[in-house]
Amino acid sequence: MLKTIRLELARTPENPDGDPEHGYEFRAPLGADAHIDVDEWHKQRQHCTVRRFEPGEDDEHGHLLHTQGRRWIFHYDGDEDPGEDEAGYRFDSHVFKAGEYVSITEHDGETRPFRVVSVR
């Protein structure tokens, strides 16, 4: 079953309170253990979408992709340059439950922490 997962920027030196207006909403199949289910992703990959949002920027829309080496990335529609993809750090082993934290390497090459605020 596909879940919609909302991530918001966690505390960083530049944003000591985090930023609920900077983050991602993506759809992914989660197993009973709250990990992304790769087998189910293969069956539903066209429905595994992402929306990236950040203040002062237009929302970006794309898909959650699984690459060689068990990497999960966000690939945005219209981007042919793989340098525009954003990689989730160890998404293959993370639990996606409210209150958990994950890291994403964003377009600018910086890896930032994000808090899972909801899974529905």
Image (spheres, rainbow, N blue to C red):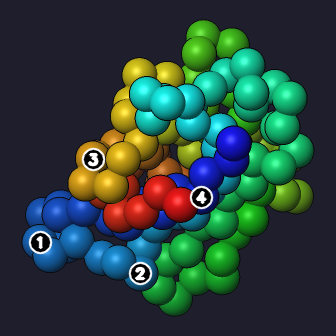
Residue 84 visible to the viewer = no
Residue at image x 88%, y 58%? 78
- What residue does disc 1 label? 16
As drawn, the residue found furthest toward the bottom would be: 56
Q: Earlier in the sequence, mark 3 or mark 2?
A: 2
Q: Name the residue type under label 2.
A: Glu
Question: Is residue 53 found left or right of 85 in the rendered image?
Answer: left
Q: Name the residue type under label 3.
A: Glu
- What residue does disc 4 label? 4
Question: Is residue 18 found left or right of 20 in the rendered image?
Answer: left
Give how far apart the Cα atoms at labels 3 and 2 are: 18 Å
Q: Determine contact: label 4, label 1, CB under 8 Å.
A: no
**Front tag of 4 and 2:** 4
Q: Position of residue 11 (x, y in %)?
A: 17, 63
Q: Is residue 64 above or below residue 16?
A: above
Give how far apart the Cα atoms at labels 4 and 2 are: 17 Å
- Callout 4: helix, strand or loop? strand
- Callout 2: helix, strand or loop? strand
Residue 62 versus residue 46: which sits nearer the camera? 46
Q: Name the residue type under label 4.
A: Thr
Mark 3 surroundings within 10 Å by alpha-carbon count, few (fewer than 14), some (14 through 19), many (20 or more): some
- What residue does disc 2 label? 21
Residue 100 bears which disc, if any? 3
Give how far apart the Cα atoms at labels 3 and 4 are: 15 Å
Q: Earlier in the sequence, mark 4 or mark 2?
A: 4
Q: How many labels were placed on the picture?
A: 4
Quadrant for the N terminus, please: top right
